[in-house]
Image: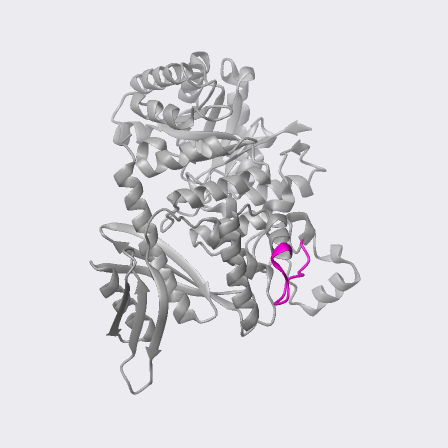
Amino acid sequence: MRKIDIFDTTLRDGEQSAGINLNTAEKIEIAKQLERLGVTIIEAGFPASSPGDFDAVNRIASTVKNSIVTGLARCVQKDIDATWEAIKVAEQPHIHVFLATSPIHMEYKLKKSPEQVVEQAVAAVKYAKKFFPLVQWSAEDGFRSNRDFLVKIISEVVAAGATTINVPDTVGYASPQEYGELFKFLRENVHGADNVKFSAHCHDDLGMATANSIAAIQNGADQVECTINGIGERAGNASLEEIGVALHIRKDIYPFETGLNLKEIKRTSQMVSRLTGVVIQPNKAIVGRNAFAHESGIHQDGVLKNPETYEIISPALIGEDDVPLVLGKHSGRAAFRDRAVKMGYDLSDEKLNKAFTEFKKLADRKKEITEEDLVTLLTEQQVLVEDVPLYELKSVQVQYGTENIPTATVSVTTPNGEIQTSAATGSGSVEAIFNTLEQVVGGTVNILDYRVTSVGKGRDALGEAVINLRYNGYTTTGRDAAQDVLEASAKAYLNAINRQLIQQSIRVHQPTV
């Protein structure tokens, strides 16, 4: 079976989605989970874009050992230098350089002639090759590029030392037949095509990213670029879980091997959803809440008699309910640690103790602890950053009545260690809480988005609040969970402020790249 490399760009292209803002600790945890999932290459970020991205890429490159770590760079020397400084600690240093090749991009964005674009691409690949053994070159907006020009520029960069050629459908315009034919054409016409890997990178603007990616594989692509849950700019990228499971389930017609550990898909999906704040649509293929739900009586009857009547994918394949629920209010620390390890969490003793304390508090109030509850508790401790003074909610109280003005009183431990208590009103309970907290943190806070969802089922389920706000001129996202949605909302607000303080610390202490 032909091996297909899985190039995951959740931390780069996925993070470019509107409203997503991951900090370094969160990126590292996602990268470690992607390594457990078995992806071939992790695109950790764009090192030259910001000190925070440089730091995250550098730390991921020094942490991940079983997946190749790469960074994105424009075809300019300073980007390549920054990427080398970030990636040189990796087991296999890899760089991903790109340059637009479509007529519209060359004329209006680059303002360069086709000859100048070829010259810049070749020079960048030659320069990158001085440092990196693995150099991937991408023709941005490749699908809408002139085919003869693509053959020319790709032949040139292959001769210059590129080891992988990526031909993306940057705006999601292709159909499967057209995209597959393009790869077949390039395989047959590019000089040196047999000496490089060809890669597909598809966006989902017309809902065909997964189909296009598989069409590319069938026509000679050795690598597909995708993201967890299909997150990404605009309508998103091709979904890793869809491609991986489709190739496995239909191996009768797709004789390809990805090397993915499919049992890690559900856990990876949940982690990315929680840390990015991007809710998975219920009917999302493979990982949606309803992916294995059956409402129709006819369907239910069939599944009870034989699951294969309506289920082509078993829940166990992707790790759904893979670990039996055995924890309760009487469970001890050893059992809790064992469960955390089996779920893929690697926590220090201090963080594990904090998570266990929160687990005990929850177990005293909640009849049944679900897998989703544990993911929430453990993930929060896993990405906790402890070396920056932060705000901590001590208490929140709201007075509300249909005939009264809602009033919130909040006590918070400030970064300097003092406890500050403030009160304010609002048109609703949540607004009253936010107005009060704005007094505590100082400055102007603009709420851009806010939502509350249920974690698990039942009237005693945790409520998870996600808030996107602008503070001190920067946009950030916060989240937290509690059985009381007002408490969760207050915690999510402070979580967003704390994340901004952490990023501010990185900006102050990290040298400019």
Q: At x 60% / y 52%, what residue is drawn?
A: 337
Q: Is residue 98 left or right of residue 445?
A: right
Q: Is residue 109 left or right of residue 14?
A: left
Q: At x 42% / y 39%, what residue is drawn?
A: 13
Q: Residue furthest right?
A: 305
Q: Is residue 245 visible?
A: yes
- Range of the magenta residues? 323-334
Where is residue 208 shown, x and y percent of the image? 51, 43
Q: At x 28% / y 72%, what residue is drawn?
A: 432
Where is residue 412 shown, x and y percent of the image? 31, 65
User: Magenta stretch: dominant SS?
Assistant: loop
Residue 325 vertical position relative to residue 69 in the rendered view, above or below? below
Q: Is residue 280 visible?
A: no
Q: Nearer the viewer, residue 328 or 416?
A: 416
Residue 395 vertical position relative to residue 103 in the rendered view, above or below? below
Where is residue 389 shown, x and y percent of the image? 32, 51
Q: Does residue 119 belong to the magenta stretch? A: no
Q: Does residue 328 belong to the magenta stretch? A: yes
Where is residue 84 shown, x and y percent of the image? 38, 23
Residue 133 vertical position relative to residue 285 in the rendered view, above or below? above
Which quarter of the image is occupied by the C terminus? top left
Residue 103 vertical position relative to residue 23 in the rendered view, above or below? above
Question: In the figure, residue 258 lies in which quadrant?
Answer: top right
